[in-house]
């Protein structure tokens, strides 16, 4: 359980986190989303007490992080920036962390095995690939067998197998009743793993919701139907929890609440010819961008080169 | 592939039957000790310091020529001075060792892992000071004795020859070990204060070697008043600790040690303040 209350962080006159207020509950995966520079990593550093809040407070399992007798057993965290000495082996890095808490060597071997680092555990961590470094960070996060797991963009740099592994891991950890808090910029990735969503933009809370509600608000999933008699098909399909939209006189309808299969069957039973039947998944990414659109810090400016009259193909300075 | 996937289910036993972990100062010391042992760079730096200390000391005794007016031992009045001349170089290697212990954590980012494990922070500084002081005092004291004993046969029968039982010799050799250990701690404190390896080393060199030179360009009346209170060897507090005979205007060995300790404590207070107050 992570409780964040009116959290503010300013660096000079830059406000990185602006009055954040939310709770991350145990038993489910909570996705933490926001565009670049939204303040996700800053919030996570404050949860661990690495950065001190300008005002407001954050507690983990009822206490400030530093107040716990065995912090690694409360929160296991993977931070955005690498937090290892490149000259030390993965094994020795984990072992040194374990020693501070009296965590046995056996547990170090376990997390190495678990994260698939067995073959490289004795090598200098400085020689690790991005994905291996990420796995080492996750191994460190799991070391204390923590109640709360907090990962800052864990899939960053992982191969497809690694991404799948992370998804399974997060789901398993949440099923065991732990609090799982994961940041990402990818709504589509979160839709696959997370149940709850916290969305921020420019340090402000934009939404504290669930993936299901977010999809609903974005319009839900619908099916596009083009038929010979859309007026009659509409009558046939309508029912509780089913919405049908379409312009009068048009052959096209948008149906939500029924699957393409059910619609096709209903049309056949009624003897209406169907010309097209296409499931339309809502673009979560688009809904996410609409929500955070005004708050994007670093907008890419396509076509700005031609506006400033620079020759085609020139490299921006 | 499947191995890693199935392994996830073995992740952890239910959070209910959790083992009792706890952070204690003794455990933080053990962790810092393990960190010290597991880095090749610390071993290399330590070995370089020991080689300088012993090698230059013995070489000085071997090349000693009482009639020489110039050269490495022209102004040496006793065998201890010859044996400990190498302290000047060894202090740099050991000071750098201290700087690397703390600033190295910031430049690599390791500090975030360290402070996540020990969020009360001060135990980390305390443990590092203990480990580095402990290691360096042993290595440097042994080095000082080896330097003296190794040079003894070459000076045998000459006017400046001394033995371990000569008055003041033991005090100088133990003093050299203590001085070097305190310099390593000073380096660690400065490294934590400035959080940069280059910055920490620069500050150390300024304090130990450049300040005495800088004093020379100030009005000459200042030098005798200020110089004995600098931490370094050249006319400073460190020099009083390891010299057999105190020169005029320098402090007694005890007073020199007190002054050096004051420098180290001041640097540690600054380091602790920065550690507790600044974001990491
Ligand atoms: N130590 C710092 N000093 C000054 N500004 C900072 C510092 N850390 C973060 N910021 C600023 O605070 C804002 C939030 O940064 P943060 O790294 O938390 O964003 P983020 O959501 O993690 O972004 P990303 O998705 O790119 O990782 C940014 O504008 C950043 O420039
Ligand atoms: Mg970030």
Image (cartoon, coloured by chain):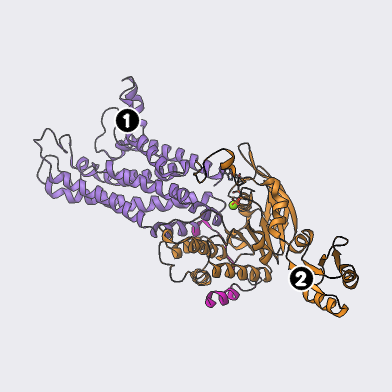
Chain colours: A orange, B purple
Q: Is residue B164 visible?
A: no
Q: Which residue is mark 2?
A: A276
Q: Secondary structure at mark 2?
A: strand
Residue B225 covered by magenta stretch: no
The chain holding disc 1 is B
Could you say which is closer to the camera, residue A125 or residue B104? A125
Q: Quadrant of residue B279?
A: top right
Q: Where B71 sits versus A207, above or below?
A: above
Q: Would you say A106 lies left or right of A181 here? A: left
Q: Would you say B65 lies left or right of B85 here? A: left
Q: Is residue B133 visible?
A: yes
Mark closer to the observer (1, 2) = 2
Residue B67 point in image, percent of width and height: 8, 35
Question: Alpha-carbon distance for marks 1 and 2?
Answer: 89 Å
Residue at image position (78%, 73%) is A260
Could you say which is closer to the camera, residue A51 or residue A252? A252
Residue B37 point in image, percent of width and height: 39, 59
Residue A272 point in image, percent of width and height: 85, 75
Q: Where A22 sits versus A177, above or below?
A: above
Q: Where B106 sits versus B246, above or below?
A: below
Q: Where A198 sits versus A178, above or below?
A: above
Q: Which residues are magenta?
A: B1-27
Residue B12 covered by magenta stretch: yes
The chain holding disc 2 is A
Residue B68 point in image, percent of width and height: 10, 35
Q: Secondary structure at mark 1?
A: helix
Q: Which residue is mark 1?
A: B212
Q: Would you say A91 lies left or right of A279 here? A: left
């Amino acid at each position: 359980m992570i409780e964040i209350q009116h959290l503010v962080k300013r660096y000079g006159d830059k406000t990185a986190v602006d009055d954040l207020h939310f709770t991350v509950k145990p038993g489910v995966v909570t996705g933490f989303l926001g565009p670049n520079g939204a303040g996700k990593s800053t919030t996570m550093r404050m949860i661990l007490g690495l950065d001190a809040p300008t005002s407001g407070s954050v507690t983990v399992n009822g206490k400030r992080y530093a107040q716990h007798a065995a912090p690694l057993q409360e929160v296991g965290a993977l931070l955005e920036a690498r937090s290892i000495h490149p000259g030390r082996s993965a094994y020795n890095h984990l072992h040194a962390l374990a020693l501070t808490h009296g965590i046995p060597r056996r547990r170090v071997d376990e997390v190495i095995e678990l994260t698939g680092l067995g073959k490289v555990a004795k090598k200098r961590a400085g020689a690790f690939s991005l994905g291996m470094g990420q796995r080492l960070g996750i191994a460190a996060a799991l070391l204390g067998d923590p109640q709360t797991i907090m990962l800052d963009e864990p899939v960053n740099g992982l191969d497809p197998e690694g991404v799948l592994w992370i998804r399974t891991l997060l789901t398993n950890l949440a099923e065991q009743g732990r609090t799982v808090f994961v940041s990402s910029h990818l709504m589509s990735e979160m839709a696959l793993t997370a149940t709850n969503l916290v969305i921020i933009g420019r340090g402000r809370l934009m939404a504290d919701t669930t993936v299901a509600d977010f999809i609903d608000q974005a319009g839900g999933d619908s099916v596009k139907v083009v038929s010979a008699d859309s007026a009659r098909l509409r009558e046939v399909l309508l029912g509780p929890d089913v919405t049908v939209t379409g312009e009068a006189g048009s052959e096209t309808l948008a149906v939500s609440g029924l699957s393409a299969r059910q619609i096709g069957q209903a049309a056949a039973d009624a003897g209406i010819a169907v010309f097209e039947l296409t499931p339309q998944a809502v673009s979560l990414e688009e809904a996410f961008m609409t929500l955070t659109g005004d708050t994007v810090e670093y907008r890419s400016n396509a076509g700005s080169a031609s506006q400033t009259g620079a020759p085609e193909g020139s490299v921006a300075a | 592939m499947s191995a890693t996937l199935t392994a996830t289910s073995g992740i952890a036993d239910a959070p209910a039957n959790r083992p009792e972990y706890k952070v204690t100062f003794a455990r933080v010391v053990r962790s810092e000790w393990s960190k010290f042992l597991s880095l090749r760079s610390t071993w290399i730096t330590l070995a370089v310091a020991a080689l300088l200390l012993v090698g230059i000391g013995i070489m000085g005794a071997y090349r000693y020529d009482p009639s020489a007016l110039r050269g490495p031992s022209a102004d040496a009045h006793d065998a201890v001075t010859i044996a400990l001349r190498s302290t000047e170089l060894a202090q740099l290697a050991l000071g750098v060792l201290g700087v690397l212990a703390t600033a190295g954590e910031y430049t690599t980012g390791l500090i975030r892992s360290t402070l996540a494990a020990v969020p009360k922070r001060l135990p980390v500084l305390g443990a590092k000071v203990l480990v580095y002081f402990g290691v360096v005092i042993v290595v440097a004291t042994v080095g000082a004795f080896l330097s003296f004993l190794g040079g003894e046969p070459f000076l045998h029968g000459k006017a400046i020859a001394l033995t371990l039982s000569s008055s003041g010799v033991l005090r100088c050799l133990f003093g050299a070990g203590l001085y070097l250990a305190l310099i390593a701690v000073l380096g660690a404190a400065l490294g934590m204060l400035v959080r940069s390896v280059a910055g920490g080393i620069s500050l150390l060199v300024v304090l130990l070697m450049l300040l005495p030179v800088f004093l020379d360009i100030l009005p000459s009346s200042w030098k005798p008043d200020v110089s004995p209170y600098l931490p370094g060897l050249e006319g400073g507090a460190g020099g009083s600790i390891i010299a057999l005979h105190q020169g005029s205007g320098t402090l007694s060995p005890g007073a020199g040690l007190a002054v050096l300790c004051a420098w180290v404590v001041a640097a540690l207070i600054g380091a602790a303040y920065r550690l507790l107050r600044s974001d990491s």
